[in-house]
Each structure stands twice: as structure tokens, then as C-alpha cells.
Amino acid sequence: MQTEKDFLIALMNNTRDFNIAQSQNWYRIPCSTKIVPKSVLEKTLKYIAFYQTKIFGDQAFSVRWFAEVKSITVTKRKFLLPEFKNDPKAENDYYKIEFEPLQELNVPIISLRPRRLLFIPTTLWLFQNARNINELFCDSPLENEFWAVLKKEKIEAERQYYISTGYNKYLLDFAVFCKHCKIDIECDGDEYHLSEFNVKKDKRRNNILTELGWSVLRFTTSEIRNNINATVSQIKATINRCGGLEVISEKTYKFFEEDGKQPNLFDA
């Protein structure tokens, strides 16, 4: 399986930019953006596709259009959008990504739950095989392994789920939605999360999320790789205590048996 992240899913949140992408074959990213994808910075990007937001009606919350990238240059906004030459951002620099004419997927890649995202660096292989937005993410090996376990156990989750509340912005490793509350599942790589500074940072984060109605579960590398059965059991028990797992496509809540038998389904 290809592992090079030379494919980018980018946000498309207005019809003007979509018309530009269709008619002029380019897309822009502000150079001032805090998280510019590595493939754009290093100009190794080969393909781009677009995640459409609610403004697109029936095509909202899906990836339908993609193209092969031709070039990446840096230019000022006033040259990209000359009709807005008096815009306060006119002198700002942007990455201009030029590409071949857009192509439409035969089967769109959808998000069953409306969600926010900015960029998903991914691979051509994942793009060609994904049917759900969560199947596009290509994060740390630990998170990829854990995602495979969640799918096997039929625990529906949103990967890299973004939430924003006031001054606090968080990207959750896995978000699980239940009847009475939501669960944030974090994969804590030992090297990063076990330092004294990050332990304190994670505690503050946990407290804020708890105030917002989230239940937070954190698992170390060892728990995921060496004691996965106990880890999964704890997740299922938490889901049951939170009123059951929301299966959004079926409008049901799912409860898990403690002995690992097939789950029970209850109408929402």
C-alpha cells in the first residue's frame, strides 16, 4: 500500500472558489495559515480533492471532485483576485495550486455526520479505496492500528474530529457519539504525552472537555499494542454507560455485551 502523502483533501466552503476551481483550475491557501500541508510547502503534492461544506446543499459534507496537480507557486492575493484589488488582504501571499480539469468521482466519499475540517493529507491508494471520510486519514502508525481495531469491533468513530469553543480549539484522535454524552478517545504516544509538561497540558484539556460534556479516555502505546482486549472492553463499557453508541446511518443506539457477543440494537 502506498504511504507517501502526496494527495490532499482541501476545504471548499464557498461557490466562488468552487467556480474558480472548475473554470480556472486553481486553488489557494494563505501562506499565513498555521498548518500548511507539508506536501504544499515542499511542492510534492500530486493530487488535490475538495471537501464541500453545507453551502453546497445535496453535495454537502462529501468529497466528489479531484484533479492532478500541475504546479505550486506563491503569489499575492491581488493577482489571484484582481477584482478585489482594494481588499485589505491584497498584498498577502498565497500558495496557488494549479491543476488539470476537475474530475468527478463515480461514488463520492461521504461524511455521515456533518463535520469541520481544513486539510486531510492522504495517499492516492486511500483516496481510491475510501467510501467514508474517516478512511482518508493517514495519521500516526499507532492511530492507524487503533482505527483498524475500532472498525473490527464495529465501534463507529470520527477520526481527527475538530471542536472549537471560545479560545479553545481541539483536534480529537477519535470522537464517539452516544445518547447521553460524547467520548474523546486519545492515543497517547509515550514519547510525547508522558513528558511532565504534556501530562499537565492533557489534564487541563481533559477538564475543559469534561465541562463541555465529553468523557475522555486516554490509552498508552502499551495498552493499545499489548493489552488491546482490556482497552476495547473499557471503551465498550463507557459507551454503555453513556446510553449506547449512536449509529447515525440507522438511527439506532447500540449497546455492547460484556462477554463480547454481538451487540444489541435499540431504536433511537
Image (cartoon, helix red, strand yellow):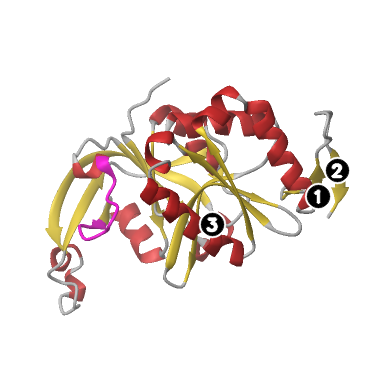
Q: Residues within 10 Å of mark 3 (few under 14, many from 20)?
A: some
Gap in angstroms between the C-alphas marked 2 and 1: 7 Å
Q: Is residue 31 left or right of residue 50?
A: left
Determine if residue 107 is in view: no
Nearer the camera: disc 3 or disc 1: 3
Query: Residue 121, located in which quarter of the rendered image?
Result: top left
* Callout count: 3
Mark 1 — residue? Answer: 252
Q: Are marks 2 and 1 in contact (CB under 8 Å)?
A: yes
Q: Which is nearer the eye, 166 or 254?
A: 166
Mark 2 — residue? Answer: 265
Gap in angstroms between the C-alphas marked 3 and 2: 30 Å
Quadrant of the rendering where the N terminus is positioned: top left
Residue at 80%, 29% in the rendered image: 260
172 in the magenta segment: no
Instruction: Identify which amino acid the numbered label 2 is placed on.
Output: Leu
Gap in angstroms between the C-alphas marked 3 and 1: 28 Å
Q: Secondary structure at mark 3?
A: helix
Q: Which is nearer the eye, 109 or 197?
A: 197
Residue at 24%, 44% in the rendered image: 40
Q: Secondary structure at mark 1?
A: strand
Instruction: Identify which amino acid the numbered label 3 is placed on.
Output: Asn
Instruction: Identify which amino acid the numbered label 1 is placed on.
Output: Thr
Q: Are marks 3 and 2 in contact (CB under 8 Å)?
A: no
Nearer the camera: disc 3 or disc 2: 3
Residue at 62%, 44% in the rendered image: 157
Mark 3 — residue? Answer: 206
Quadrant of the rendering where the C terminus is positioned: bottom right
Q: Which is nearer the eye, 83 or 151?
A: 151
Look at the magenta stretch and give its main secondary structure. loop
Over which residues does the magenta segment extend?
29-38
Looking at the image, tell me whether mark 2 or mark 1 is earlier in sequence order.
1
